[in-house]
Amino acid sequence: MTATPADFDARFFRSALGRFATGVTVITTETAPDARPLGLTISSFNSVSLDPPMILWSLTKSASSLRHYLHARRYVVHVLSSTQLQLAKRFAYGPQAQRFDGVALSRAPGGTLMLDEPECAAWFECYNLTQHEAGDHIIFIGQVERCHRNFSQPLVYHAGDFDLTPSTEPLSST
């Protein structure tokens, strides 16, 4: 690994990364051994493999919920639709103890706690296969056991904020 130059501007780096639009997800599981619901909003979600089906997401090492996700056997990744902005904010900024207040819950086919939100663009029930330390984050690799999708427009995170409207700019100037 090479060293980062002393004059490297971390804030500019973060701003540059923000130019890449990502989808918005809520990841749910339960704490062990008391089975309390746990959930958070994540935009660091991506596919890894089709065979076997695997996804990844990352969580900062400073997250208060990190220890629970490290030990969770399974979790569900919910890809939010553009109509679910308030849900994304609730699970991103609200106190963990209140995130599930008034939210309908159900079980994925394998028994994992999930949001009962039919408007989600997709969901993935995952076995918590492995984790990898990478800088100030932990990368989670999930083996997808079951999934579902709709044809909803996804909620997008871009330039440090949620983005609800697709661009109307032309793709080309010719």
Image: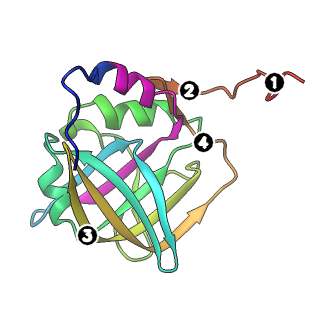
Q: Secondary structure at mark 3?
A: strand
Residue lying at 15% horizontally and 65% vertically, measured from the top left? 71
Whole-Å distance between the Cαs marked 2 and 3? 31 Å
> N-terminal of the two: label 1 or label 2?
2
Which residue position holds label 4?
154
Whole-Å distance between the Cαs marked 2 and 4? 10 Å
> N-terminal of the two: label 3 or label 4?
3
Residue 170 circle label: 1
Q: How is the image coloured?
A: rainbow
Residue 130 circle label: 3
Q: Which residues are magenta?
A: 12-30
User: Do residues under tags 2 and 4 come within 8 Å of each other at their CB atoms?
Assistant: no
Which residue position holds label 2?
163
Residue 131 spot, x, y in % from top left: 23, 64
> N-terminal of the two: label 1 or label 3?
3
Residue 48 spot, x, y in % from top left: 46, 65
Residue lying at 17% horizontally and 61% vertically, measured from the top left? 70
Q: Secondary structure at mark 4?
A: loop
